Image: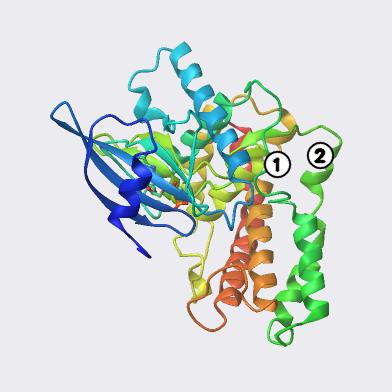
Amino acid sequence: MPGYDPSRLLSVSRHFHIYGELLHAEPCKVGHINETYTATYDQGGVPVRYIHQRINHEVFKDPGGLMDNLQRVTAHLRSKMAERGVRDMTRRALTLIPAQDGRSYYRSPDGEYWRTFVFIERVRTFESVESAEQAYEAGKAFGEFQHLLVDLPGGRLHDTIPHFHNTRKRFESLQKAVREDRVNRASAAKVEVEWVLAHENLCDTILRAMTSKRIPERITHNDTKFNNVMLDVATGKAMCVVDLDTVMPGCALYDFGDMVRTTTSPTLEDELDLSKVQMRMPMFKALCRGYLEAATFLNKHERALIAFAGKLITFTIGLRFLTDFLNGDTYFRVHRPNHNLDRARTQFRLVESIERQEDAMQKFADGL
Ligand SMILES: Nc1ncnc2c1ncn2[C@@H]1O[C@H](COP(=O)(O)OP(=O)(O)O)[C@@H](O)[C@H]1O
Ligand SMILES: [Mg+2]
């Protein structure tokens, strides 16, 4: 992990309300976004683990607002679970450890933002869904997460990344990138750009339903990848949803749509063999069943767009990859030439697969 420095971690750790002496710490994950460390403290002769995490404040411009969201959301999850008599609460939701000054984070003299969580033991994450049972667990975990937050008190959360899933704005960014053609790649992406332009009608369906309030704004996770669900090692059941940086006001369907995008195809998002890219119905069914069993708050307009949501988010992410390709790969990290173009192609192939099965997908959801 870049720049791992035990003495830096030791000095950060002193600013949090943790009893006992730091025994050792180690990097936990080379994340795309944050730096995450596992730290073990001696508490009364028992080793107890915590997570220290440095917030990436280049991506999140308002770490204070982000932490305010996180603190409110985790407190509410806890109080809802207490109401319902849920046991094992510190394994069912993230628990923030306050800083010595009472705030939910610590800002170091060199401007880094740090936060600390109770370490959740005996769980693990998977990079991708390996079975329909796991797809069910993923759907259920994010559905429950949204459900518990339906009645969050205290007003609107901060928008940690404004217009995150606004497909119309993403579409306009693509048009601009094509017009400017800054790095002379438009000709290489001609087929894909035409494909996107031919699908422009996807952009506004959900935005319009939100403007007219048929679809309400909800509190959503916005990064519903399977590796953000912690599963109990013993039972395989979902325990806790993590990675709450992008929790903000949004559309519930976007969370579901991104689950469809990331769990139903057997391929990675940059698969080169497009013939392997497909929306697998058994995975969709399990995911959808888990989600709808938990997300009982959805209204009929939201439920009617369940299948569409998968198509829309896959289209939107594809648009973003393509735009980044045209802009010279400034947002998504690339590991080979044309990487973002490959990623866009994979998404568009998946959109086509969903299109072919959309009626059957929606029929299944309607029958639940
Ligand atoms: N409270 C926790 N207890 C145990 N492991 C955690 C905890 N929080 C995060 N992790 C681990 O660290 C990883 C990265 O954390 P995450 O918040 O998802 O950051 P990133 O933005 O880098 O994905 C998670 O996938 C999980 O394995
Ligand atoms: Mg994560």
Q: 33 left or right of 125? A: right
| Quadrant where the N terminus is found in the figure | bottom left
Give the percent coordinates (x, y) of residue 261: 56, 54
**Observer able to see residue 247:** no
Label 2: state its secondary structure: helix
Q: CA distance from mark 1 to mark 2?
A: 10 Å
Kindly identify the residue that appears in the image at 42 percent across and 49 percent down: 227
- Residue at the outermost right position: 212
Neighbourhood count class around disc 1 (C-alpha, 10 Å): few under 14, some 14–19, many 20 upward: some
Going by the numbered disc 2, the residue's amino acid type is: Ala
| Quadrant where the C terminus is found in the figure | top right
Give 244 or 68, whichever is nearer the viewer: 68
Name the residue that disc number 1 marks: 305
Give 326 or 133, whichever is nearer the viewer: 326
Label at residue 91? none
Q: Are marks 1 and 2 in contact (CB under 8 Å)?
A: yes
Label 1: state its secondary structure: loop
Neighbourhood count class around disc 2 (C-alpha, 10 Å): few under 14, some 14–19, many 20 upward: some
Q: 293 left or right of 356? A: left
- Residue at the outermost left position: 45
Give the percent coordinates (x, y) of residue 35: 41, 54
- 321 up-or-down from 279: above or below: below
Give 87 or 44, whichever is nearer the viewer: 44
Mark in the foreground, 1 or 2: 2
Name the residue that disc number 2 marks: 209
